[in-house]
Image: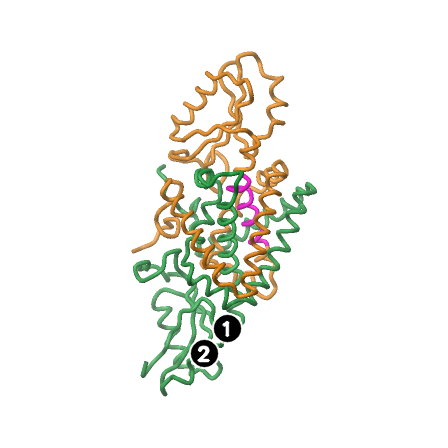
Chain colours: A green, B orange
Amino acid sequence: LKKGVVITDVGSVKASVVNALAPLLPAGAHLIPGHPVAGTEKSGPSAGFASLFDDRWVILTPPENTDPAALEKLSAFWTGLGANVDIMTPEHHDLVLAITSHVPHLIAYNIVGTASDLEEVTRSEVIKYSAGGFRDFTRIAASDPTMWRDVFLNNKDAVLEMLGRFSEDLTALQRAIRWGDGDALFELFTRTRGIRRRIIDAGQDEAGADFGRPHED
Amino acid sequence: LKKGVVITDVGSVKASVVNALAPLLPAGAHLIPGHPVAGTEKSGPSAGFASLFDDRWVILTPPENTDPAALEKLSAFWTGLGANVDIMTPEHHDLVLAITSHVPHLIAYNIVGTASDLEEVTRSEVIKYSAGGFRDFTRIAASDPTMWRDVFLNNKDAVLEMLGRFSEDLTALQRAIRWGDGDALFELFTRTRGIRRRIIDAGQDEAGADFGRPHED
């Protein structure tokens, strides 16, 4: 800790972390919170693999007055691992992650919970027919419970804001189904296809069908 | 159509289909609606592959008075393709599919729509950071818009029922986040992990991390 750069890998980069640690740092040590947006549903060192950071994005949220040389050094570390680096405020990071990661995890956990509580449809039916779409949600709903509990408790404001929008939009869709408004459904379903295409073009997901799940052909 | 078995592959097996077709069938032709719960986000013949039905489940919903020999023949057809066959009423099929497929598709379409409408977070940020979880949802939100519009219009009652439960559960989670009830979050997040494990044990998804998305190691 004497010299160089301190990296913290935190899902929710709070100013509070910086404020708590800063007074304890010796001279010449720099604190630059960062978040590599990469990984799988598995945690721990044995879940790593050589290409984990290839073409993934790392968010750095340097406090004001960060030494530019330290920031440069940390950026070079990440690009050396194959990642791309973006710099933003902790507040903006929390918003970006709320919609790209936290709310997706929450609704995945939620639908898996809803399905496992049904009486009309048995749990073994849910398992058997999961290839119809449900199983995609179970992957992220298998993520580490302790870490994700803490993410939600620590990024409350941004998660509640994005969740409010999600629920509002879902209510509008529900209404479209109830009233038979096929055009509203079709319009949305067409628009969302374009986002998938952009994610694949940006190298952020597999182009193959079904996430490239292994298939015999 | 003169002899043998008619198969219909319909996401939502409605009694109305049977009622409309039955009077038009010549003697010796049997109508047994069925739904193979298999496939990817791609549609059409070129999206097929040899192992498409291996270990997947096919739901048959034979009308009353179906010729047992015809049902036997159709079941043998599907098991010959590597699938397992289940028999149930159309009403139960619609409920099972609502929770394992239709609601998952709807919330995937919905969150992709919510994310693409934000002003505070740009669309290119959503794309760049999609590896945090969001991209999983874009796969099924890239499914055929025409087919899915029709699924929701035709399975309205079961979808609205399951969607009501989903929203109720999500509101409870939202409340747990707002009030800092970490135990409630932890309990759910632990329970959902078990469902993932059962889906993998049942051969309905990849055991590898990240759906077995190709990684260099």
The magenta span reads B97-113
Q: Foreground: B117 or A127?
A: A127
**Numbered disc 2: what chain?**
A
Residue B133 numbered mark, or none: none
Q: Is B31 located above or below residue A122 in the figure?
A: above
Which one is in front in this view, the residue at disc 1 or the one at disc 2? 2
Quarter of the image for the N terminus of chain A: give it.
Answer: bottom left
Residue located 43% across and 29% down the image: B85
- Going by the numbered disc 1, the residue's amino acid type is Pro
Tell me, yes or no, whether the two marked residues, 1 and 2, touch with CB atoms within 8 Å. Answer: yes
- Secondary structure at badge 1 equals helix
Name the quadrant containing residue B78.
top left
Tell which residue pokes out farthest to the right in this image.
A179
Indicate whether A51 appears above or below B152.
Answer: below
In the picture, measured across the screen, residue B79 lies left or right of residue A183, that is left
Magenta residues: mostly which secondary structure?
helix
Label 2 neighbourhood size at 10 Å, few (<14), some (14-19), many (20+)? some
Residue A122: x, y in percent?
48, 39
In the picture of the structure, the residue carrying the numbered disc 2 is A18
